[in-house]
Amino acid sequence: MKLTFYGGARMVTGANYLLESADVKILIDCGLHQGSSFCEALNWEPFPYKPSEIQAVFLTHAHIDHIGRLPKLWKDGFRGKIYSTPPTKDFAELLLLDSEHILREEAKEKNKPPLYGTSDVIETMKLWRKVSYHEKIRIGSPGSELEISFYDAGHILGSSSILISAGQSNGGKKIVFSGDLGNSPAPFIKPTEYFENADYVLIESAYGGRFHEDLTERKAVLEDLIEETVRGKGVLLIPAFALERTQEMIFELNELAENGRIPSAPIFIDSPLAIKLTTLYQKYSAEPDYFNAAAIKQIRSGDAIFNFPGLKMTLTTEESKAINEVPPPKIIVAGAGMSNGGRILHHERRYLSDPKTTILFIGYQAVGSLGRRIMEGAKTVKIFGDEIPVRAKIKAIGGFSAHADQPQLLKWLEPMRGHLKKVFVIQGEEEQSLALAQKIKDELAIEAITPSIGETVVL
């Protein structure tokens, strides 16, 4: 069997892996490149394989850097099947339609053809098949077939690690694609599942060299920041990814508000996409396949975990603009999570120059993104053509990350230690990937490499 790394190698985004055997060609993920201008330019490059020859795509989760080029794959000739968990499919339709609009505007600015259109998204969704955790899908001829199954990655609702078991003609090898592994235990989704037996593993490394704050401390830090904001009559800006991070923030704010741990102040969720995605969280919220036991108990007791007094969902443009008329103190949670688009930009343009403002980063900020520049201390930033001085206080809480940190990644690998032949460290900036690879060699005594884009290995 051959494995080729067509994305997510020495970079965080653009996950795309081609696995080939004698009569099977499948992809794991088909994500958008995001972050720097160089990364974004890669999205318009032709696929380095023939989409029409791909029999199936298996998706680890619904983040755009894992699904964002699927409509382009369809547009370029793919007619196989797409497999994912039910939440991933439901999220993907909303996210791909939202992404289509953003990419169309981006293409217009750069004088490029649209990457894909709405009709391509609609046709892509027709190829989709929903799969439960641990359900087995078989592709290929008897003896050389591949058996694929999904396991809970604990990253976002419906996220998966994928186990591929090869037939005897391919040596009976087992390959695990980690997807994005969760920062477990998460507030309401189930924890990450572990594997005991695999020959090869592809493991993400977004935080491969980093350590998160203790999960129990993050709520206290958030509480302190809200108290400071209210006391100083300021604005707390929270750029948040529409999927999972916003819902996690609502859940934490709900807990703080209901237990009287934060003073009263209006809290705005200013992201149409996040609001729509939250309704899907509510759809799945009573299902034990996805939500943990504590969250289900809370829901069944009558607690609306994604709603509480003082929370305002601003779906329309008019509602969003009306936030400006609300005097501080106030809290604004808005997308995009890396400040690379969305309504957060309007709020940053308005409030970043005010020393009473605090901007809180709760997720990964890619190299080249506006969020990364602000977080690293830029004195001025350009937003909508205007030079904005940054006088706001800059804060970050790593404990809110939905990604596993280095100790969690090593802990996930450890049960497979006795069987593993090789680990491929992917989906991280080069520095983070190299740090994790070295740690795997030193602590687990397993060969670990950081592949490059386009590199092929024989398994």
Image: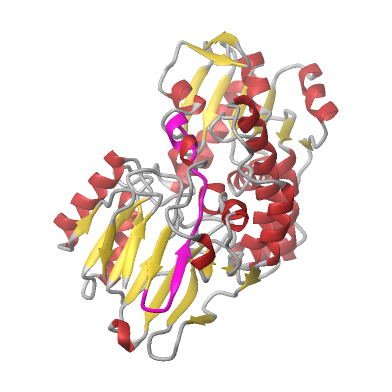
* Residue at left offset 71%, top offset 67%: 286
Instruction: Identify the image quadrant of residue 20.
Output: bottom left
Predominant SS along the magenta part: loop
> Left or right: 272 with respect to 294?
right
Residue 24 is covered by the magenta coloring: yes
> Residue 214: x and y, percent?
41, 45
Closer-to-camera residue (402/20)? 20
> Residue 324: x and y, percent?
77, 18
Q: Is residue 19 above or below residue 185?
A: below
> Residue 103: x and y, percent?
63, 37
Closer-to-camera residue (98/339)? 98
> Residue 89: x and y, percent?
65, 62
One can see residue 282 in this view: yes
Q: Quadrant of the N terminus?
A: bottom left
Q: Quadrant of the C terminus?
A: bottom left
Instruction: Identify the image quadrant of residue 127.
Output: bottom right
Residue 8 is covered by the magenta coloring: no
Q: Which contiguous range is marked in magenta?
A: 21-40
Closer-to-camera residue (214/191)? 191
* Residue at left offset 46%, top offset 82%: 140
